[in-house]
Image (tube, rainbow, N blue to C red):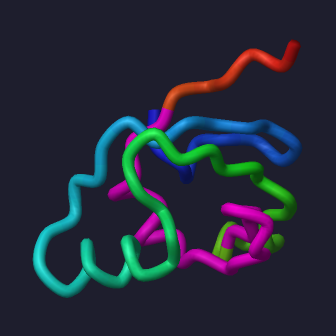
Amino acid sequence: MTLKDAKVGQTVKVIKLTGTGPVKRRIMDMGITRNQLIHVRKVAPLGDPIEVTVRSYELSVRKADCEMIQVELVEEA
């Protein structure tokens, strides 16, 4: 599952970043790294961008970048 597949309101955990070079660096510069929790806040009507919360920061991530972030769903306790 990628971040693009996550639904609004879900919290997911990053498993792997599949991007390379500058794309991977851009994703990591946003604070999205392995084992990081991401909460999906909002998705634009056409699916681009996806607004997420990472480490208490609100970010907009492009759909193409979201496809390079493999995640797993975190069960809310």
- The residue segment tinted magenta is 50-71
- Disc tally is 0
Q: Is residue 52 magenta?
A: yes
**Residue nearest the viewer, comparing 51 with 38:** 38
Figure check: 3 above or below 47: above
Q: Residue at x 13, y 70 (%)?
A: 20
Q: Quadrant of the C terminus?
A: top right
Figure check: 55 above or below 25: above
Query: Horizontally, is 70 left or right of 7 in the view?
Result: left
- The picture places residue 3, in percent across and down from the top left corner, at 54, 49
- The picture places residue 49, in percent across and down from the top left corner, at 66, 77
**Residue nearest the viewer, comparing 45 with 33:** 33
Query: Horizontally, is 30 left or right of 47 in the view?
Result: left
Query: Horizontally, is 13 left or right of 54 in the view?
Result: left
Dividing the picture into quadrants, the one containing residue 5 is: top right
Q: Is residue 22 magenta?
A: no
Q: Residue at x 45, y 32 (%)?
A: 1
**Residue nearest the viewer, comparing 55 with 73:** 55
- The picture places residue 50, in percent across and down from the top left corner, at 69, 68
Query: Seen from this angle, which residue lies furthest front?
Result: 55
Q: Residue at x 72, y 72 (%)?
A: 46
**Residue nearest the viewer, comparing 11 with 36:** 36
Q: Residue at x 79, y 37 (%)?
A: 10
- The picture places residue 44, in percent across and down from the top left corner, at 79, 73
